[in-house]
Amino acid sequence: MVRYFSQHLAAKQPFFSLPNTVLILLMMALCLLSNNVYALSKVTATVDKNPAMIHESILLTVTADDDVNRNALDTSPLLDDFIVGQTSVNSQTSMVNFKTSRTTQWKIVLIARNAGRFIIPALSIKNKKTEPIELTVLASNENSDDKQTDIFVTSALSHDQVYVQQLLTLTIKLHFAVELKSGSLTEPNLIGATIEKIGQDKQSDSIINGKRYRVIEQIYAVTPQQSGEFTLQAPVFSGEILQASKRRSSFLSFAQTKPVSILGDELNLKVLPVPDNYPSNAQWLPTDILTLHQEWQAPSEQFTVGEPITRTITLTAAGLSKAQLPKLDMQSSPGLKIYPDQAELHANIRNGRLISQKVQNFALVPSTAGDFVLPQMSITWFNTITNRIEQATLPSKSISVKAAEGAISQSSTNEFNLASKLNKTTDNSDIRAKSLAPQSATTGPIITNQDKTLQWLFLGLWLLTTLAWLVQHFYLSQKKPVKMRINHTKNAGNHYLALLAACKKNNAEQALSLVLPWLKEILSRDKPEIKISNIAQAQVFVQEQSFATALNDLQQHLYGKSAINGAGSWQGMALLTAIQTVDKQQGANTKISGLLPLNP
């Protein structure tokens, strides 16, 4: 057309001639006709099923015969009687025999809130309205076998009345007899409660009223934190199902999808408060059953000083989560150290009930021989079946600990020393008694001849000794006093050096085996009368906190279960520093007490 105008201008022909005027009018008419072809003239609405089943999705399709904005359709009038789910918009342009047509289509998923007869109101797009649709929604008991739905959701609670913080299970099952392309279930929601999914989804097959369904099952643990009456919101399934194509040729046809949404049932729950008679100082544990069980590493009732004893306590509860299981405490006693291990928690579903367990190991290390009584362990809980307060109890237990082989107890040593002193005293008394006893009487006079030579000899020797002592004393008084130090024994030095080497190598077993010999040697420097048979007795005389802490860490590493399994390594630097500190302190004490004057 531009070329036509340019040709006439070049020819200097009048533009508004009759042929040109007719041509312009024709072009304007074509433009008007083309605009009328694409103008919106009609809006229609249809549903995919009528009647429909309660909680079953209904697909409402609204079609406009023009390309319009996707937000031009207002669906708010549907909210009064329906739950509006997924909405998709699709625009198409087609040409048949040089005739172009455009359409815009909305697919809206609806779920009826109640059973009955409803009117889908007229929906408007650019002043064009759809026709109202009369819809019938049937209840579940009104549905016959031939009207049975292909997809539905069921949900159930293990209890409809529980106590606050009592755990109950929610089971949600999705049944479908068609092929799903995609889909998802909404998470359950309950005001004032914690909800946690248990395990993975389970899949199975089921036949209901002669129809085979594929079933996907989900289980949740629900723990209400407030008392009162609550409503658990219904689960909603949203997804797409595959439909067979209506085209006859399977080679060029593709499977079509259809959006669906399914609404489950709402569930009512009543939560009771904590009973007034429950002890205020006890942890609130509402459960069906709670038990305590203990195991020992060996059936023998005889144990040895220094050897660890493993006691395993298992707490089992039904209807409590792992986080609700109480702490297990074991009381210690003098001469018996207790090292608790990290507790192990387990939970699984058995016969529709959640069973939780706490398993904890305790390492008991006796430091002295004797009999020990482990006090009973009890846990207060509330029986939700009988509505009574009960106690789970482990009775007290007595254990007997014997001394290690080759070790001499303090009492035995004292008795031995006392007996030696008594025997020595008795021998001296007998000698003195014999020397003082009168001689037996004899007949006749006793003639005694005295020789004065020996007496003068002894007197002379005594005078010489006295003179020599005076000279020596006068000579030494001119010099500084001599200090004599009690020498360490060779074994003490060997034990000390070997213990330091074991700490530097981080060898826990060797270090613990050398601690007691080293303590015996350093304590015998100043107080030889001290007799010790274990580390606990030695710590009474060694008042050094850093040494006690380092030694306790060493025993914890050797006797704790996690360390035995190789979960950690021991570092001996802290014990090495503490040993050097104790050795210097004991050396200073020995130096002070070892300053002896020279005897004549």
Image (spheres, rainbow, N blue to C red):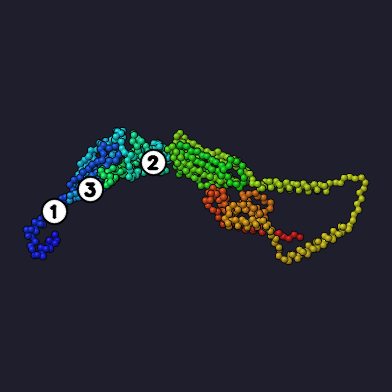
Rate crowding at label 2 as few (under 14), some (14 to 19) or many (20 or more) other CA atoms within 10 Å: few
| Residue 320 can be seen in this image | no
Residue 553 place in picture, x, y as percent: 56, 52
Q: Which residue is mark 2?
A: 203
The amino acid type of the residue labelled 3 equals Thr
Residues at marks 1 and 2 touching, judged by CB atoms closer than 8 Å: no
Distance between mark 3 and mark 2 Cα atoms: 39 Å
Residue at left offset 52%, top offset 38% = 393
Frontmost of labels 3 and 2 is 2
Pick whichever of labels 3 and 2 is earlier in the sequence.
3
The amino acid type of the residue labelled 2 equals Gln
Residue 238 place in picture, x, y as percent: 32, 44
* 551 on left or right of 215: right
Pick whichever of labels 1 and 3 is earlier in the sequence.
1
Pick whichever of labels 1 and 2 is earlier in the sequence.
1
Placement of the C terminus among the 4 image quadrants: bottom right
The amino acid type of the residue labelled 1 equals Leu
Distance between mark 1 and mark 2 Cα atoms: 63 Å
Residue at left offset 27%, top offset 37% = 52
Q: Which residue is mark 3?
A: 104
| Residue 531 can be seen in this image | yes
Name the residue nearer the viewer: 319 or 453. Answer: 319
Rate crowding at label 3 as few (under 14), some (14 to 19) or many (20 or more) other CA atoms within 10 Å: some
Picture quadrant of residue 9: bottom left
* 171 on left or right of 448: left
